[in-house]
Image: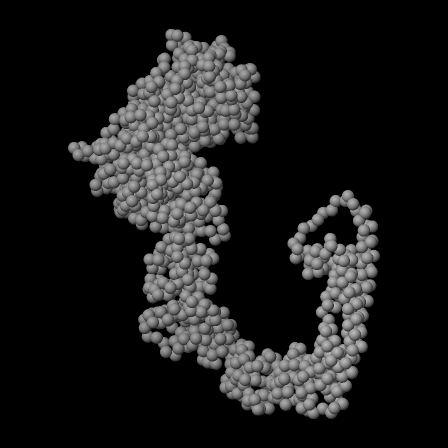
Amino acid sequence: MRNLKLLKSLRRSELQGPGSPQCFYVRADTGSLLIASQYSITEYDPRTVETSQADSFLPEDGSGVVVGLQDLAELESACLATASGDVVLFNLNTCQLECVGSVDSGLTSMSWSPDEELVILTTGQETIIMMTKDFEPITEVGIHQDDFGEGKFITVGWGKKETQFHGSEGKQAAQKKIQPTVAWDDRRPRVTWRGDGQLFAVSAICPQTGARKVRVWNREGVLQATSEPINGLEQALCWKPSGSLIASTQRHPNKHSVVFMEKNGLLHGDFTLPFSKDQAKVKELLWNSDSTVLAVWLEDMAAGEDGQLWTVGNYHWYLKQSLDFGRDPQKAPVCVCWDPERPLQLHVVSRSWTSITYDWGWMTERSPGLDATDNANVAVIDGEKILVTSFRQCVVPPPMSSFELQLTSPVNQVTFLCRPQGTNQVAAFTANGQISIYSQGRLTKLAECFGLPSKMSGIYLIILAALLDDPLALRQLLWLEDELFVGVSSGLLPTSSTLQMLRPVQDATDTLGVRAAVEVDGVVVSVVHCSQTGTVALQLEDGQIRKLPSVEDWRDSSGCRINFPVPCIQTALCSISGEECLLGLTDRSHLYAGDTEVLSQHPDTSNLFSGRRIPTGLLENMHISVCCSSCRLQAALASDGSQNDETLRRVERGSRIVTVVPQDTRVILQMPRGNLETVHHRALVLAQLRTWLDSLRFRDAFECMRRLRINLNLIYDHSPKVFLEKIQTFITQLNSINQINLFLTELKEEDTTSSMYPRPESSSIQHQPSSGQKKVDVVCDALRNAMESMDPNKFCLSILTAHVKKTVPELEIALQKVHELRENPPEAPGAVSAEEALKYLLFLVNVNDLYEHSLGTYDFDLVLMVAEKSQKDPKEYLPFLNMLKSLEPNYQRYTIDKHLKRYKKALLHLSKCGEEHFGEALQLVKEQKLYSEALKLYATDSVHYKALNCAYAEHLVEHQQAEQAGLLLWRCGEPVRALQAFAGSSSWRNAICVAQQIPLPPDQLALLARDLAEKLTEQRRYADAALLLDQVIPHKTYCLSSAVNTQTVFLEAQVATFTRHRTRLAVVREQKEKAKLDMLGENKTIVMRSSKNRRKAERKKLSLKEGSPMEDRALMYALGEMITSVDKMRVHNLLKALVLFQFDKQAAKLQLSYEEALQMMEAAVPEVWPESLQNSQLTVLK
């Protein structure tokens, strides 16, 4: 849905050569023109007006004809072919001529391959000569061949062509004779190459039929295919550079068409030219270098020379530009050529040696409005029609449209009114110099939806002298105000431009005249207007930016000049941080904000828009940024996008943005195939939702979120405080039970503004209310309270939903409300009945859960009501309910709670049932471990309390908590069992106290003390053991001797084991040293691991088994453990006790043994851990 918009044109008439131009070629390296006339060849640079001319090589009488011209960059020469048969090289440096060959029969055409390795010459004898770039002949064959070629079709026996189906024309179509070519055909062969240089096609007049026939040859000069006989085939021939089709023209009895052929010679599609059968003569067809535009150079019998630019989309051909050169033969083009390097640059040379260079750019013409009144109109030029689609109402795929505006002349430019509230008005500038104005009305019929506006109406003729010299003299047309148009024309100098201010002429109601003209020093390539501020900005061809009306330099807030580093094809004005900024998009998809490049990593971009949002369409990604500074814009567009990045969306490669619907969430994309897709980009959606929520438009936000599957939690998370304050507004706007219920059911504790939909950097953070409650509970309670105060009958179902959706569902309260509805049915009209409410609850909650919760209310009427609405079999629940009704109330509730596994409540009710049920209560306490809860329900001086304590003590003993069990038993008067518990837990103080309370005889008390001392000694609690024996047994000798013996035995065992491991380690290391000698020079693969994982893996491999791979490390680890254990022995406490009670000899012996052990281990450290291994081994030991 793009149009070709003229960016600039360069018209030069200074060159005056001998004779008249016959053909020309554009040099790819310099951009200069090589123009050949009947006298000489001239090199001319339109930008610098530099000219160099060769010596005459053609007859002086002017009878010479140049049939071919080619620039050879490698040879720095130009090759010419003349009708007399000469092939001449023109040296571009020395301007010397050299004849490299001649053909006696003359030449009719010359064509070089795209790689400039081969040249095809067609001779006057109807032959093809193929030569190398050094003009060495390869082959010479006749143009007219009887054979079809190597690609001859295979006959499958379906009969002759005369017997086949021929459509509406009938069998007579097969019997028609081929008509000879038209009289004005120059009868010269046409040669065209495919883009890859592997094939070329030749169109020549067949001697037998007099009609043209196309033959396809390969690079070796072998015929591949011959076209089928085509009636009315004309001379124009051009192979599409992409290689798919060969274009030519054909005259039909009732129309004139451009037809396409495949490389096998069969027709493949066509489109009709806007002329009748004999109205125009097509001279040439020319594809541009990227195969996107087809130029048709023709001569209109009535209007003179014309040029047309056609593009294709969705298999429909659009006439985008029409160049009317008039009937003056001196202004008529004698040759037309596309630039080989710039795909959209066209060169025209007229008979009077005037050269015109046109530069076009792709542009989507869209209405510039930013408010909801703008219909997001997009206008597509198609010859004399404008196809308008209003994307706010509907998405119509091209080539169809919402409306068609039929004009009387081909359209070259379309512009929409820039005034706010009037952006649906459109103006069309046609090839005959007129402007037609239309306005979109509010009529019902599609054909009448465009009428005439109030202030300007009809068709206006522009009075501008430049339009008489150049068919596209007025470009960059902009409709600024109701009666003001701004256009750009060429200035007084080739390097300047003139801004033409066009207004209606007072005396003539249908004429626009120039009211003011502003000269600009530079070539203007774009004009852009900001409807919010009224600013008009100009961009010059070198990237400079000017500001109207004074044509001054564009400056930022600091006064610095701002220019684009490179020229931009598309420009747009927007506001960033309150400062106007000009955005530019180059043909290489580099996006600039002033002189700052904010995007450069993508190879193609389609469209640029400005406004409150700034989207740019990319080849594979689509970024939409809502930024407050150019730096943030640059960072947003340069990022690859995280998981929740709202600015980035993947799209199909080659997609283009058509338009964005203002004040909406829709982005219209055009796919590479031409079809349209509507995308609700997340950035636009969230930005629009935030705007609606800020303005308290809850309904619009809700409907958009529901339609686009945005989490409804955003309504609350965006601004919790405002939502809670305006919760009645929210309920009033939605005014729908279903929508409120949907909102409640989607509530989650997650804050969507920090996870799913992060806030923009420029927005303020809205904190959640710090009430201590959970978010879901806060919202449910707030909505429930508001609905109960507004109309509880109307919002009954929503109130039930608020109860059910809380983090701890309040099903009992919800069921109670249903029961109240059943007992007291509301009389208000439209109120919900109890059956409807219960049915809705069954939809929200599982029927079994609801049945059990109804049981938990102990209300059998409510239980029956729920059971009846469920699909339960009465045989399942009626016996159970009847059994419950027969029980005593407390025991009944106990039975219900136990059935519902609410054991704490069951125990509470069972404790009220009397002593006869205490055994059942005790069993329940033991099964469910409700000891703490049970102790609270009985008096401390009761028998039941004692029984519960004993049961609790048994439970604690089973769970290795004997000391706590002993305390409980001692407390409830069970000293014997308490003594056993204390003795088992080594709680010697409590045990001695209980033993003395019993009391135990002295001999049994001493035996108990010895047993406890042994247990304490085993636990290395030597001080406690000594203290116990000292307090209970008066003989201290026994106590200290026992402790000394224990320490001595342990120390001797450690020393012996240490010595054995030390000796073994020396042996293992000696064996490994010998083994290393055999492994020198071998390559080993080292597997790198993290330090933590490496230590863990190494510990698993440690084994003290002799011969194990890591025995040395295991021995070192064991030795380290022994040193640690010996160092931690509490010998000093025992030594103090021995000295205190005058056991000096035993103390000296123990101290000596301990000191010798420490010295021996300290002396072994350097041997066990050499300096080279200490650090690494100590790391392993950790």
x and y percentages locating residue 415 in the rendered image: 30, 38
Would you identify the image quadrant in which residue 933 lies? bottom right
- Residue in view at x 42 percent, y 53 percent: 761
Tell whether 792 sits left or right of 875: left
* Image quarter hosting the N terminus: top left
Above or below, 56 against 1022 in this view is above
Regarding residue 148, the answer to whether it shows in the image is: no
Q: How many marks?
A: 0
Front one among 139 and 53: 53
In the image, taking residue 461 as reference, residue 809 lies left or right, namely: right
The quadrant in which the C terminus is found is bottom right
Image: 714 above or below 160 = below
Q: Would residue 675 appear left or right of 1131 to someone viewing this image?
A: left
In the rendered view, how is the structure colored?
one colour
Q: Which residue is rendered at x = 45% and y = 68% of the image?
A: 774
Q: Residue at x 45, y 24 (%)?
A: 28
- Quarter of the image where one finds residue 57: top left
Of 434 and 624, the residue lying toward us: 624
